[in-house]
Amino acid sequence: MPHYRAPVDDTLFLLNNVLGLQSRSNLSGFSDATPDVVEAVLREGGKLADEILAPINLAGDREGCVRHPDGTVTTPPGFKAAYDAYAGGGWMGLSVPEEYGGQGLPQVLNTAIQEFASGANLALGMYPGLTQGAIAALLVHGTAEQKTRYVPKMVDGTWTGTMNLTEPHCGTDLGLLRTKAVPNGDGSYAISGTKIFISAGEHDLAENIIHLVLARIEGAPAGTKGISLFLVPKVTVNEDGSLGGRNGVSCGSIEHKMGIHGNATCVMNYDGATGWLVGEANRGLNAMFVMMNEARLAVGVQGLGQSEVAYQNAVAYAKDRLQGRALTGAKAPERPADPIIVHPDIRRTLMQIRAFNEGARALVLWTALQADILHRSEDPKERQAADDHMGLMTPVVKGVLTDRGFANAVEAQQVFGGHGYVEEWGMSQFVRDARIAMIYEGANGIQAMDLIGRKLPKDGGRAMMGFLGEVQAFLKEAGEDEAMAPFTKPLQASIGDLQQATMWLMQNAMGNPDNAGAAATDYMHLLGLVALGYMWCRIAKAALAKKAEGDAARWDAKLVTGRFFMERSLPETALRLTRIKAGGQTTMALEAEVF
Amino acid sequence: MPHYRAPVDDTLFLLNNVLGLQSRSNLSGFSDATPDVVEAVLREGGKLADEILAPINLAGDREGCVRHPDGTVTTPPGFKAAYDAYAGGGWMGLSVPEEYGGQGLPQVLNTAIQEFASGANLALGMYPGLTQGAIAALLVHGTAEQKTRYVPKMVDGTWTGTMNLTEPHCGTDLGLLRTKAVPNGDGSYAISGTKIFISAGEHDLAENIIHLVLARIEGAPAGTKGISLFLVPKVTVNEDGSLGGRNGVSCGSIEHKMGIHGNATCVMNYDGATGWLVGEANRGLNAMFVMMNEARLAVGVQGLGQSEVAYQNAVAYAKDRLQGRALTGAKAPERPADPIIVHPDIRRTLMQIRAFNEGARALVLWTALQADILHRSEDPKERQAADDHMGLMTPVVKGVLTDRGFANAVEAQQVFGGHGYVEEWGMSQFVRDARIAMIYEGANGIQAMDLIGRKLPKDGGRAMMGFLGEVQAFLKEAGEDEAMAPFTKPLQASIGDLQQATMWLMQNAMGNPDNAGAAATDYMHLLGLVALGYMWCRIAKAALAKKAEGDAARWDAKLVTGRFFMERSLPETALRLTRIKAGGQTTMALEAEVF
């Protein structure tokens, strides 16, 4: 039976010692996040993940969701009780403003909890995760009345939320969407159409589901400029907040998927369902992007969560399974064989995942902290820098953390040999569940195109210049510090690769956009590696400081893990650069018919 | 519904124009393999794969195997008829000597058919595949009487074969195995013990199953030196070849696995089952290794097969799915959007898989041809060179082709977006099925250790020197040929990386074996990349010659695909070298308790 233990201590170290959470008390809500409160929140959230969410993960995969002939959907055994614990603990509203029933704490704490939930039980964690995304969209674009009527009930978990974008013939290219909205004359619209791949579209966890639905108002322009966002409750809500009648929306079927069996992925049929416009007409994509950026960050965190839980279980197996002897002589001569953790190739696997996870956790929290700055700072310059960071790093966190998170789950599964392939050990589930994160909220190729085509050139490349400037300032300050050299020197080399790649794109992509397209995925990973390398430099600096205070064993382990990353993972930047500079010629040369 | 089309034309080109099959008529059986026969065999085998095996693949995954309370196992609908077609077509004995009912044709043709079968239906293809492995072991190590009694019935498919190695507490480390063999006094042994992960251990496809079982004769030495190989039929066979009574072996349960649901993975209980020694007592591992080498090559081929079928389906989807517009302007302005094959990131994905598959197919066939030379040449020098090649390349073909084959299936799945995650499209199955190939017949980490610890240093490194010598002779002969330069120059660079890595190991691994262990997987991939790069050079040379004869479009496509490999895939050798030279220090530094 697989297990999970939330990485609370590592998260605390990152928040307190690497990211300096306590120095941010100028941000609203941060003064409440005293060290004691932060630790209490994380320990309690960790307990929820370890003791409530994780134990029902394997059964959730095996049992899956069931759709009944009447269109209702039952979630796996234990999911309802766990969801109630999640909602009842106030976790959904951790960083929602207090006026809507939340606790107003920093978003970065919520992100940490999202990692724990995603690691413990991805399928379950998606229900509150999607609800948080819907809350975020309503808080930014909803009317005052929509906020007061819907948000508090979503914050306390009585209702959940969804996002409805995809249709059978369009996912990435939303300009093609056909779901239509006809004005009812009373301010509401009649929504009709079919949406597919709607996560948490129907279930038995909450008394109502608030669907946010993209649709085209009758007569609206074609393409993406004619798309509007609507709020469509499963059960209509009366003015006093009580439930009215069933709306014209129903679950037509659920998909048989590779993983996340505990989350109902629904075909949703809208048959003249009553909906209300959220934000301006024809500006629906804009409104939806609030939700999508939030969701993209959360999906990156899912990649990390699955990588972490797969790692933890691989470690346990590697310490337990006896097979062969260490190359340097028996380590457990009293037993019939050594535990396989003595073997270098097993170590390599574990260290690679470990080094990624610890760096990725820093990157995630750093980025979530920028979201806090963006939404809570009163300094416009600071807000702009945070916005730049978010724009640049959201696709990287989503794309790189899910690509690597999946690959790490596969590597961790490999540690189990044949047992990794058998469902009862749970490693297959981590792989199958992690796989979705590379696809949804914009497939990773789309993230790469978003990065290279939109985020990178935006405002004359200001975001990238800001990032490079910050890293270079750090390297300059570290100077010739010998203790930092194993970290700063490799980063220096890799940032050179990033600069060359960026320069190459500037010179070669304008005239031939295929050069950019063919480079996009490699560039995204190159930037991700540099960002992780920078995180490791900051972690190393903090670890060296902590080591001077004591507990050398813990901080030495941190420093070794970081050196492993710098020596073995970061140099991949050179390969990415080589591929980028190869250009798009051979990639695009063949006619489609030749394939 | 996924489809498969066996790559018959590419295989013919490789056999005839790259590997010079027809120049090998000195080898026994090869004179029968005239161009007409070779083409007829491949076309017929391709038809079997396309029309009989592939159409039942998806249902086989969904239905799976079922074990009944009486211990019998039913395979999925259609499997029995497909197996009968496979066996009835004489495919099992394609390269088995005629005296045992086979056709005596080159092994390299059998390997080509194995690719087709593995691509079309991996789970089904395993039943004959394991039977072929058992036949190979019996032909080398069985007594004359064992050969005549068992082999012909396996060749004609009336009986199938298995290999029984793994036990609950031991897989990789067979020295720990406990299954015991007690002499019955009549030349037979009573075999007792439990074996797990036995593919095709029980099923309804054939009237008998010939298990080859590793066990320890009472009183035998501990460890690997006390292991013997036994033949244990499910139903005993009388002297006249007729079936006797049920033997004391039964299927206790079948595993619930991530994939290959159409193949029964059994726990086999041996309860005093009657078995006969195969080969010498206590030399069972030696005998089993014949079967395992055969099997390892075949598993590498499975990686290629899954990569190919995933590629073909991704291509079909990419041509069909309309989404977005080409970066360089609409390619299908009359339609609502362009097919996604216009997008560079989709192209990159397809080209990467295509370039791998075509190179890997050459590597597989080249290696299989060495097996023919080893077994059929009368020239001892040629045999030794072939043996060296097989030793060096078997772990590479197994490890690299299955690692990449799986990764390619994942990439191909990504082309489908959300549809790739839904089971009905079949892409999930390719990923789940391909995953096993990285694990069984020795997990890929074991392949890497076998390569670096056994095959590389063997005979003073003769095999590697032979390989390097051949590649360098090719490069020298190509000289300054401009048409070949896009191929030879990158290979020159990568072979330099391989030489440096080999040198580094010689200098650093003797004193510290952990340096070798930490380098093993990277070294295996480095060698695999160079071998694929060398294959592409030979393919390019042949394609240039063919192009001079006409059909320029076909050969230009081949050359572009090869250049893609040389520009974008091969440079990974530099990254592998960097990792190898990082040594094992950070990999091994942490105490096991720190994890």
Image (spheres, coloured by chain):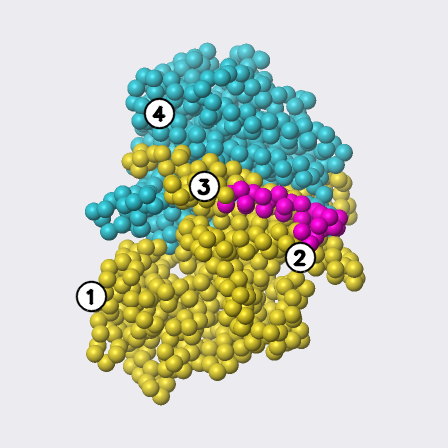
Chain colours: A yellow, B cyan
Q: Chain of mark 1?
A: A
Q: Chain of mark 2?
A: A
- The residue under the point 53% across, 63% down is A386
**A120 left or right, relative to A158:** right
Q: Tell me which segment is drawn in magenta.
A: A476-502
The amino acid type of the residue labelled 2 equals Ile
Q: CA distance from mark 1 to mark 2?
A: 55 Å
Q: Which mark is residue B555?
A: 4
Same-chain check, marks 3 and 1: yes
Residue A460, x across and y down, in percent: 46, 53
Instruction: Return the residue at label 1.
Output: A219
The amino acid type of the residue labelled 1 equals Gly
Q: Are marks 3 and 2 in contact (CB under 8 Å)?
A: no
Q: CA distance from mark 4 to mark 2?
A: 52 Å
Residues packed near mark 2 inside 10 Å, few (<14), some (14 to 19) or many (20 plus) = many
**A21 left or right, relative to B512:** left
